[in-house]
């Protein structure tokens, strides 16, 4: 039996200070102030929201999947997970989650990884790394490809077996499932709403997500 | 195989250097319970580096062993695991920090205990990355050679304290010219409250000529073959 921890939020959508929709294949980048809460909603279900975090006061210190995993001694993210930077600094904490489990081992898709995973002729397809880089290019010139580390895949289930196998499981999220995180430090959030068309996880149909932010 | 060079990385030690394509790097644990953290970069383009997620996804594994290749973020093979006594090397638990090291083993500093002070993986990598023209923004997942960190059905990570025995070996082959950065610092999940003290020996040899038709790592999966093909294209275009 594999645990999924589901926790509802008490926040009222009408009181959010930001309420935006990110279409499939689009990016989004914003700074969260300490105490602000970000909600990401999987509007149509089984969409991957590839998300990176940076310490906004020290942009060299980016999200670390491995420091996050080692810090909590668990490979999956859900309510209570503290997402850490490479230095170990806590950036955000997941405070509500109606999906119950999120992946941080699988990383984002890229043109190059698509050629490896699927076929050489996939090089031209739209991918998350391109979305990340376009957002970084538009930001202020301070971020480069060097700053792209392994990310969180909200709403993705990538089960790891006790003997070290890695699989991709469909259907853990559903229309309207959301995850909410409170900023511990000033944190830059970078999202790529995944345009992946080669993976059956999203039934080959990338869909929009919604992002809301509340003040403390 | 022609033996080129050897070194020993002491507990707490670090090393970085450039290794040409076609080198065999044999790492030997000189005591039980070793953990050697490894980062890899393309020596000619340091923005290209080891990518843990792409490596794991493409090979449908959460552990590394013989047959697996270490892929870059540009879909190429930086190195391959061509021999392995252990069957499991960790790449999802990262390195120790100063705070974590002090909390687990007790605070030490150079002023008080001289070279017996306890090094952290984060600081070791920070030093070597700056030495190589990089910085902490270039940190990312490492390969923790010799360490087994499995997880149960709930995702709880379990470090296997009996996994690595004295004399255990693993051999990497460089498939591109790489910058390699090493830190002999404990796995963050090692439950021991005594700082682990296993030295690791590194022997470098010239690898036999690469023959795709018989190469175990090339033939391991279609994904590996395509990553090697990307690497071959890169070398062809760059004239290497
Ligand atoms: Zn993607």
Image: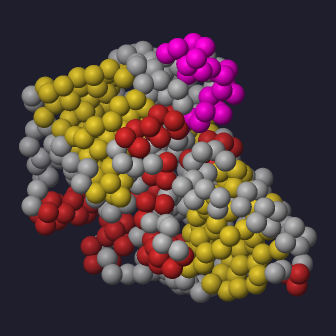
Is B161 left or right of A216, judged from the image as shown?
left
Q: Residue furthest front?
A: B111
Quadrant of the image occupied by residue B174: top left
Quadrant of the image occupied by residue B24: top left
Quadrant of the image occupied by residue B167: top left
Between A149 and B209, the one lying in front of the other is: A149
Residue A145 % position (x, y)? 42, 65
- Image: magenta residue range: B95-118
Is B15 left or right of B21, judged from the image as shown?
right
Between A58 and A133, the one lying in front of the other is: A58
Image quadrant in which the N terminus of chain B is located: top left
User: Which residue is at a point 54% across and 76% down the rendered structure image?
Assistant: A139
- Can you say whether A213 is above or below B3 in the image? below
Is A31 left or right of B218, judged from the image as shown?
right
Q: Mainly helix, strand or loop, the magenta region?
A: helix
Residue A63 % position (x, y)? 59, 56
């Amino acid at each position: 039996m594999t645990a999924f921890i589901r926790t509802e939020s008490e926040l009222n959508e009408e009181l959010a200070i930001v309420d935006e929709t990110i279409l499939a294949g689009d990016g989004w980048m914003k700074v969260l102030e300490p105490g602000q809460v970000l909600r990401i909603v999987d509007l149509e279900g089984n969409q991957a929201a590839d998300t990176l975090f940076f310490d906004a006061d020290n942009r060299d210190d980016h999200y670390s999947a491995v420091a996050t995993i080692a810090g909590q001694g668990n490979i999956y993210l859900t309510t209570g997970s503290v997402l850490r930077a490479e230095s170990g600094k806590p950036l955000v904490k997941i405070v509500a989650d109606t999906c119950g489990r999120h992946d941080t081992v699988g990383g984002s898709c890229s043109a190059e990884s698509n050629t490896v995973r699927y076929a050489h002729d996939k090089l031209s397809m739209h991918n998350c790394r391109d979305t990340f880089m376009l957002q970084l290019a538009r930001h202020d010139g301070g971020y480069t490809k060097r700053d792209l580390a392994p990310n969180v895949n909200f709403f993705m289930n990538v089960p790891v077996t006790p003997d070290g196998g890695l699989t991709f499981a469909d259907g853990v999220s559903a229309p309207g499932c959301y995850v909410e995180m409170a900023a511990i430090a000033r944190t830059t959030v970078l999202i790529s709403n995944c345009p992946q068309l080669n993976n059956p996880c999203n039934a080959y149909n990338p869909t929009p997500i919604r992002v809301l932010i509340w003040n403390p | 195989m022609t033996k080129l060079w050897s070194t020993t990385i002491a507990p707490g030690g670090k090393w970085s250097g450039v290794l040409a394509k076609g080198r065999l790097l044999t790492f030997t644990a000189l005591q039980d319970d070793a953990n050697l953290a490894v980062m890899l970069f393309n020596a000619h383009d340091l923005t290209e580096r080891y990518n843990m997620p792409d490596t794991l996804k493409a090979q449908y594994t959460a552990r590394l062993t013989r047959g697996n290749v270490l892929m870059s973020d540009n879909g190429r093979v930086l190195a391959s695991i061509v021999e392995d006594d252990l069957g499991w090397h960790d790449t999802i638990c990262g390195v120790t920090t100063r705070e974590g090291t002090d909390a687990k083993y007790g605070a030490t500093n150079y002023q008080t205990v001289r070279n017996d002070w306890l090094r952290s993986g984060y600081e070791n990598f920070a030093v070597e990355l700056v030495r190589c023209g990089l910085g902490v923004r270039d940190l990312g997942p490492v390969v923790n050679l010799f360490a087994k960190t499995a997880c149960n059905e709930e995702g709880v990570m379990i470090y296997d304290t009996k996994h690595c025995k004295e004399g255990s070996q693993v051999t990497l082959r460089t498939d591109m010219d790489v910058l390699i950065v090493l830190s002999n610092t404990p796995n963050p999940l090692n439950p021991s409250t005594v700082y682990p003290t296993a030295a690791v020996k590194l022997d470098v040899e010239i690898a036999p000529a690469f023959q795709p038709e018989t190469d175990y790592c090339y033939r391991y999966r279609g994904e590996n073959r395509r990553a090697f093909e990307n690497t071959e294209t890169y070398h062809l275009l760059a004239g290497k």
